[in-house]
Image (tube, helix red, strand yellow):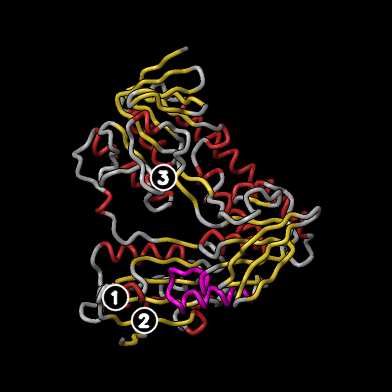
Amino acid sequence: MDSLHADVLVVGFGKGGKVVAAKLGELGKRVVLVERSEDMYGGTCPNVGCVPTKALVHHSRKRRDGDISQEWYERSVNTVQELTALLRAGNYEALDSADTVTVVTGKAVFLDPQTVTVDDLTITADTILIDTGSEPIVPDIPGLRLSKYLRTSTQLIESTTLPPRLAIVGGGYLGVEFASIYRQFGSQVTMFEDAPKILRHEDDDVAAAAEEILSDEGIEILAGADVVEVVDGDDSATVVYERDGERHSVQVDAILAAAGRKPATEGLGLEAAGVRVTDRGAVEVDEYLRTSQPHIFALGDVNGGPQFTYISLDDSRIVPAQLIGNGKRITTDRVAVPHTLFMTPPLATVGLTEREAHAAGRVVTIAEQPVAEIVAMPRAYAVEETRGLMEFVLDAETDEILGAALLSVDAQELVNTVALAMRHGLKAADLRDAIYTHPSSTEAFNDVLGAIVEE
């Protein structure tokens, strides 16, 4: 059996791991990076996550009434796959071409705290980073896991066949985004959510506004519906669900399990390494991202933190701070981390919802307006997208910005301005009275933050 020794071993080619690998390699450290699949160089985001899904959002919205759905979809998927292949090759070349970095393809399994095997190769290392990401969760619904019509998000976006009838089990971010994409491509979409509303973590008015947009686009939303069984047929599947005490069923051609993702730790041999995991299977880490073994760190989705590429990027700043820096950067320094759901228009949020602020005992004021009524936002009319609303949750005594929900054109960019303001202690009045370019979406803050409702 061949062997290698590295200063740093990175298990998984995710965002955080690859950034640390490149940085340490530039400093002359001997780095080995192991990725189990040649289809995943670069991690989830450029291959099966952010990039391909957002590209499909773009392509789905370009389809005209005269375009044949299947042909447009197949063309779009092929175009997106060409893009991901380009990014994948670039990620591989950027690291493997470095004199100090070696990329190994294969499944890594720990033998002990210092050693992993990859097929017939043994790798030992002084420092090890685990960055294996996450994988889709398939709900334990009778008949679902064995259904030939079941699709994960990865399988769905890589197939060039557009399902005429698509069922989506889950009304969270993933379910809503895919419902929006596939409806625009021409699928008949039915979304099942067992909670009383989709987007259950958002305030009721925000979730209702999003649901209205989706429903108006022809998506059937069945909130309060509990899927109890999936029955395969020769040409389709029957999804059986209960709602309001009655049992119903619907015929579909594909079923997307959109119940979230879980840390990808199965089969890594973490017990042999003495690395503890949580009840949910995540690698247990402290605020410095150290595991129960002080020389082993975990970055990105696998450590059970927020599952966003930009969190993994921030992880890649924390680990080098421990290895070669002053060691002061920690996860608890993070505040006002924004999120975006790429429906159309996008829904971007940051900080506390109104419900969470009340639960925390804060006395709040609310600044809220429908986009169609925001006088200082002509950009919405210029691009013919006036759907949605903007809502700010403010501290009634201090004018502190506690949170925001922006369901509007350009929301994915606007939320970064709000988050930056929150991190640096700016008040709502600072955003309200700022000078913005015109016509822009940001200048909507001038109007919205003037519309205060005391609670």
According to the picture, the residue beneath numbered tag 2 turns out to be: 367
Residue toward you, 53 or 221: 221
Q: Residues within 10 Å of mark 1 (few under 14, many from 20)?
A: many
Q: Position of residue 235 (x, y in %)?
A: 80, 54
Which label number is shown at residue 428? 1
**Residue ID at (39%, 31%):** 10
Report the quarter where the C terminus lies.
bottom left
Name the N-terminal-most of marks 3 and 1. Answer: 3
Q: Secondary structure at mark 1?
A: helix
Q: Position of residue 325 (x, y in %)?
A: 22, 37
Q: Residues within 10 Å of mark 3 (few under 14, many from 20)?
A: some
According to the picture, the residue beneath numbered tag 3 turns out to be: 281
Q: Residues within 10 Å of mark 2 (few under 14, many from 20)?
A: many
Which quarter of the picture shows residue 336?
bottom left
Q: Is residue 207 left or right of residue 363?
A: right
Residue 382 visible to the viewer: no
User: What residue type is disc 1 on?
Assistant: Ala
Q: CA distance from mark 3 to mark 2?
A: 40 Å
**Residue ID at (39%, 41%):** 16
Residue toward you, 409 or 218: 218
